[in-house]
Structures are given as structure tokens and as C-alpha cells.
Image (cartoon, helix red, strand yellow):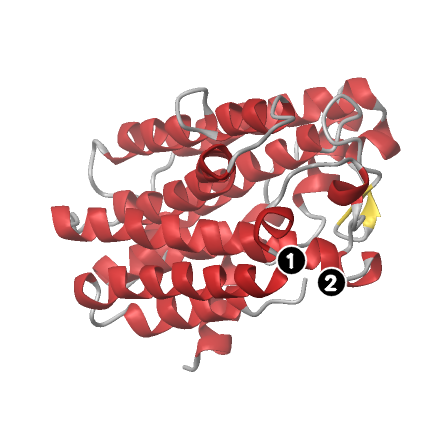
Amino acid sequence: MDYEAQYEQARQMAEQALKESLLDMGPHQELLQAMRYSLLAGGKRIRPVLVLKFCEALCGSMEPAVDYAVAVEMLHTYSLIHDDLPCMDNDDLRRGKPTCHKVYGECTAVLAGDALQAEAFSRLATSRRTQRVESNGEACAVLAQAAGAIQGICAGQYLDMNGDNQTEERLNLVHSWKTAALLKAACLLGLTASPVAPTMAQWKAAKEYAQGLGMAFQIRDDMLDEESTTQQLGKPVGSDRENGKVTYVTLYGLDSCQELVQRYTHRAKLAVQEAFPDSSEFLCALADALAKRDH
């Protein structure tokens, strides 16, 4: 299969598993509806695709990693719900739809994010798809580090919200933690789910690939905030500039940002070409596609 067909196959596999999640109803059904509203709002499903394809790179199958793919998207969705809240970025639009708090209210949105994070770890801990006894515990540790206050999403978000005078070094730190950390977790979760254990070289290569991918992704995001429209992105554009927020574009300008995107993308591709010779073609094509994306 070509790159597009492979990506769609993995995306559909993750999408189906997500649709089958959170189906219980009860007196708290509005909370579950809020969780599903954000979880099933669309998106490229980059993180679950990475989970599935890194698992396949080791063992030839995506099946062992399905629960892990669902978990990483649940945690990603929680972070988006909280990121959109009035106390954070105060955004009214996400993926072309009103944000969770605009539909269900702030209280329910906070609880929906909290519950999605808990459900993510439950999904990891109780998965029966993996064959190694230790896999689920290792997976919980991988995702916890990406989510937390030590080089994870919460740490990156704190620096982002409390950085009126961002330097180049601090901005790199913000997005290494806030953006690249969860992409890194996705790649490592795929390796963890595989019944075939990765080598140290493959583990290291997955981290380096995700770091390059994450930095290129964020810089491209900053560029799109300047170049694109709300209709194209499905979320407000120009808010960073209006709020006086320091971004890669304000530091370097659009032309230099494009060069940085290519540099980080090249690093990502180099990392996997030797460690995953039979699977690097897809992973390199994914890096190139994200570098060129328009939404």
C-alpha cells in the first residue's frame, strides 16, 4: 500500500476503537456525552496512528496496540479540552466545532477532561491485547511521564502560560514538553505494545524521531496561525499575535521557520531510517506530510 492508504488504514482502526469507547449511560450521561463530543470531533489522529505503526514496525501487526492508541488519543483530547478553557487559551472553536466548554459549560468540560485522562490510564492498565505481562505497567509509566509535571504536557503548559518574555531556549523547552512529549509517548507506546521487544537503538530512534516530528509540527502550527484562515484550521487564527504571545514566527519570521521545519523533519527521518529499515518509508512520508500540512 502507498502512504495515504496505510495512513487511512491505521486511522480507521483507531477511529473505530474510539467510537466503541464510553458507551455506558446513566445519571451522568451528559458527562459521557461531553467526553465523546470532544473525543469524536475529528482530527488527523496522528498520535494513535504513530502508536499503531510503531507496533507494526516491530511485530508486523497493529492489533496489539489498539488499546494503547485509544489511550493516547483520550489523553490528547483531555489536554485540548483544558487548553481551550477560559482560564487557559479561552478558545471558542476546535476542529471547526464549538469547544467543549461552550457546549456543556466549564464545570462539565473540566470534568470531561479529567475523566478522559483517568480513562486513558484505565485503558492501558487493563488491555488484554498485549502478550508481555509487563507491557501495561510500562505503558502507564510512558504516558504518565508525557502527561505530567516533569518534562510533560502540564510542565509545558505552565511555562507557556507564564512566559511573558519567552526566549528561544524557553520556547524550545515549552514545545518539547507540551507538543513533542506526547508524540514521543505515542511512538514508545507502539514499541511497548509489541510482543517483540525493541532494541535500545530502536527505542532511542523512536524518541529522536518524535522529538524532530514534534518540533517541526509546532513550528508549522505557528506558521499556519499567521498564514491560514479559521475555516481552514477549524480554530481561531491570529490569536497569538493579538495576545502578544512569542512564537517561532515572531522570533524567526516565516522564511526561517520553513527552514527549521525542514531541518527538524530531516532529523526525524534520519533517526528511523537505520533503526527501522523495513518501516521507515511510511514514517518518513508521515514526517514530510506533516511538514507540508495546511491545517
Q: Is residue 276 above or below residue 51?
A: below
- Residue type at tag 1: Met
Q: Nearer the viewer, residue 40 or 79?
A: 79
Q: Is residue 27 shown to the viewer in this render?
A: no
Quadrant location, the N terminus: bottom left
Which residue appears at 69% of the width and 26% of the height?
112
On the image, the x and y values in percent for residue 19 come to 63, 48
Q: Residues within 10 Å of mark 2 (few under 14, many from 20)?
A: few
Are dots 2 and 1 in contact, CB under 8 Å? yes
Q: Is residue 55 left or right of residue 123?
A: left
Q: Is residue 225 above or below residue 152?
A: below
Q: Which residue is mark 1?
A: 223
Q: Nearer the viewer, residue 14 or 168?
A: 168
Total number of numbered discs in the rendering: 2
Q: CA distance from mark 2 to mark 1?
A: 6 Å
On the image, the x and y values in percent for residue 235 come to 78, 50
On the image, the x and y values in percent for residue 107 come to 79, 17
Which residue appears at 48% of the width and 38% of the height?
71
Location of residue 63 (image quadrant): bottom left
Quadrant location, the C terminus: bottom right
Which residue appears at 62% of the width and 61% of the height?
254
Q: Is residue 11 left or right of residue 22?
A: left
Location of residue 110 (image quadrant): top right
On the image, the x and y values in percent for residue 9 come to 49, 68
Q: Is residue 133 shown to the viewer in this render?
A: yes
Q: Residues within 10 Å of mark 1 (few under 14, many from 20)?
A: many
Q: Which residue is mark 2?
A: 227
- Residue type at tag 2: Glu
Q: Nearer the viewer, residue 200 or 191?
A: 200
The secondary element bearing badge 1 is classed as helix
Which residue appears at 82% of the width and 56% of the height?
230
